[in-house]
Amino acid sequence: AYYGGEAHCAEAVGSDDYDPTELVCPSCSNTGGQLQVCPKHGTDFLDYKCRYCCSVAVYFCFGTTHFCNPCHDDFQRVTPIAKSDLPQCPVGPRAKPLSGSECPLHVKHPPTGEEFEVK
C-alpha cells in the first residue's frame, strides 16, 4: 500500500506487510523536480525515491515528502538535517552513507534531500 496521509500513515507504522504492486503514487503528488512520464503508462504508476536515501519510497507525508519505511520510522531525526549536511549517493536507509559508488537504485538522480520520480 502507498500511504499518502496521516490517517493511513499512522496505521501502517512498523508494518512491512504490503504488496509492492500496490505502490502507486497519483500524478497529483508531484512535489517538485521534473515529473517523468512513462511513454507506456503515463504518470499512473510512478515510484518515488525516498528524499533521505537511495530507496524506493512507500510513504508520502506532510504533502511534500516521500519516505522509505526506515526513514519514515526515523523521520524525527532525518527531517531536520540540513540539505547541505545530508550524505550523497550512495545513501542507505536512515540517511546513512554507504561505501562504494554504485547507487542502490541504479539510476541517476538529484542530490539527497530533493524529491525525485523514479522511472
Image (cartoon, rainbow, N blue to C red):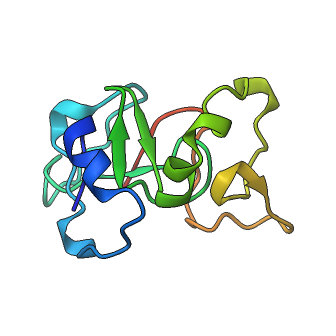
Examine the rendered structure and indicate whether residue 99 appears above or below residue 80.
below
Q: Position of residue 119 (x, y in %)?
A: 36, 56
Q: Of all residues shown, which one is farthest toward the right? A: 99
Q: Picture coordinates of residue 70 (x, y %)?
A: 55, 58
User: Residue 88 occupies which quadrant of the picture?
Assistant: top right
Q: Is residue 105 above or below residue 68?
A: below
Q: Quadrant of residue 58?
A: bottom left
Q: Residue at x 42, y 41 (%)?
A: 66
Asked whether residue 111 appears in the rendered view, the answer is: no
Instruction: Report how many numbered discs are placed on residues in the image.
Output: 0
Residue at 32 percent across and 35 percent down: it is: 35
> Residue 54 at what x, y percent from top left?
60, 56
Answer yes or no: is residue 51 visible: yes
- Comparing 81 with 40, the one in front is 81
Q: Nearer the viewer, residue 50 or 3?
A: 3
Q: Position of residue 95 (x, y in %)?
A: 70, 49
